[in-house]
Amino acid sequence: MKKITGYFIQGLLFLAPVTITLYVFYFFFNKIESVAKFKVPGLGLLVALVGITFIGFIASNFITYRLANFIDGIFIRLPVVKMVYSSIKDLVNAFVGDKKSFNRPVLVTISGQENVRVIGFMTSENLESMAIADSVAVYLPQSFNFAGNLLIVSASQVTPLAADPGQVMKFVVSGGVSPIGKKTRK
């Protein structure tokens, strides 16, 4: 009976992440297909991928680049829209844009105690514009959640980590369960 229970647990450990990931993608693309009312299953996924790629191609074109900047300028000037739009734009750019912000993993000592530390990502080294000298901004993503906290700490409390930022993010978001390897220097 112990062997059967062990196999059952191993099956859950394998299937849970796969099933949850597939379900999230299924739910997302099923919504796209139900809104667009496609008759062929999977066509919504294809249309979404082609559409996003096409918009990226158009936005990077010199002529339409000006139009994209014009639209961007309008959204940035609208009072309430500016806050939401710029926050989302900065967050997306932090992960996939040219201004990747989560590329400097650090270890932060909390309250001067060497035995209490957290892993985060340094997002700003200069806070003088807010009259905060000798401090840095560190973003702490939360485990099993799409949220986090921003800490302002003394620069002396921050130790850079020699690890791949993607692996560090996976390590933090998984609650420390996913293994982390050393960053390979080129």
Image (cartoon, rainbow, N blue to C red):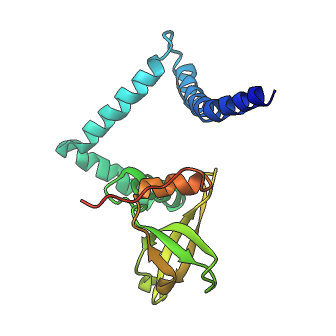
**In the rendered view of the protein, which quadrant contains the C terminus?**
bottom left
Residue 139 position (above or below residue 136): above
Q: Horizontally, is 142 left or right of 44 in the view?
A: right
Residue 89 location, x and y as percent?
43, 54
**In-front residue for pair 169/183:** 183
Residue 103 location, x and y as percent?
39, 62
Q: Horizontally, is 65 left or right of 8 in the view?
A: left
Task: Give the mark count.
Answer: 0
Residue 85 location, x and y as percent?
48, 54
Seen at 24% across and 47% down, the residue is 65
Seen at 30% across and 32% down, the residue is 54
Q: Is residue 72 visible?
A: yes
Residue 72 location, x and y as percent?
36, 53
Farthest residue, direction top: 39
Seen at 26% across and 37% down, the residue is 58
Farthest residue, direction right: 1
**In the rendered view of the protein, which quadrant contains the N terminus?**
top right
Residue 15 position (above or below residue 80): above
**In-front residue for pair 157/135:** 157
Q: Is residue 89 visible?
A: no
